[in-house]
Amino acid sequence: MPFATVYPLYVQKAERKGRTKEEVDRVICWLTGYSQSALQGQIKKKVDFETFFAQAPAMNPNSSLIKGLICGIRVEDIEDPLMQRIRQMDKLVDELAKGKSMEKVLR
């Protein structure tokens, strides 16, 4: 699935709860190491999630601190590395949309 298909849904979810596109971008860049321009480049290229994460400059070492439930599954228990990264991103966007402070979201 292309990352560019899901990205607008992340933004919509956050904006419905009073957060901004810039905050969503900050969370994604924190997790993946992409710069703002590189993130937009990946969206324009319509890369799939596997490529998006494979080309990520540097996954944040604190990503292992992302824990909790997403879709009824514990993020930290997901064995497939790609699916775990996807769910980590989902979790960060969820926390942002639920009103957590940026400091807490970014651990």
Image (cartoon, rainbow, N blue to C red):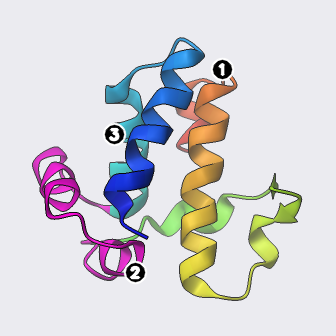
To which residue does mark 1 refer? 99
Left/right placement of residue 86 relative to residue 33 reads right
The span shown in magenta is 33-57
Could you tell me which residue is drawn at 40 percent across and 20 percent down?
Answer: 20
Where is residue 85? Give x, y as percent: 55, 70
Residue that extends furthest to the right in the rendered view of this protein: 72
Placement of 44 over or under 15, stated as above or below: below
User: What secondary structure is found at the residue carrying circle 3?
Assistant: helix
Three-letter code for the amino acid on which mark 1 is drawn: Gly
Placement of 89 over or under 22, stated as above or below: below
User: What secondary structure is found at the residue carrying circle 2?
Assistant: helix
Closer to us: mark 2 or mark 1?
2
Left/right placement of residue 97 relative to residue 57 reads right
Left/right placement of residue 4 relative to residue 98 reads left
Locate the N terminus and report the quarter of the image it occupies.
Answer: bottom left
Q: CA distance from mark 1 to mark 3?
A: 16 Å
To which residue does mark 2 refer? 50
Corner quadrant of residue 49:
bottom left
The answer to whether residue 43 is magenta is yes
Three-letter code for the amino acid on which mark 2 is drawn: Glu
Three-letter code for the amino acid on which mark 3 is drawn: Asp
Residue 25 tag number? 3
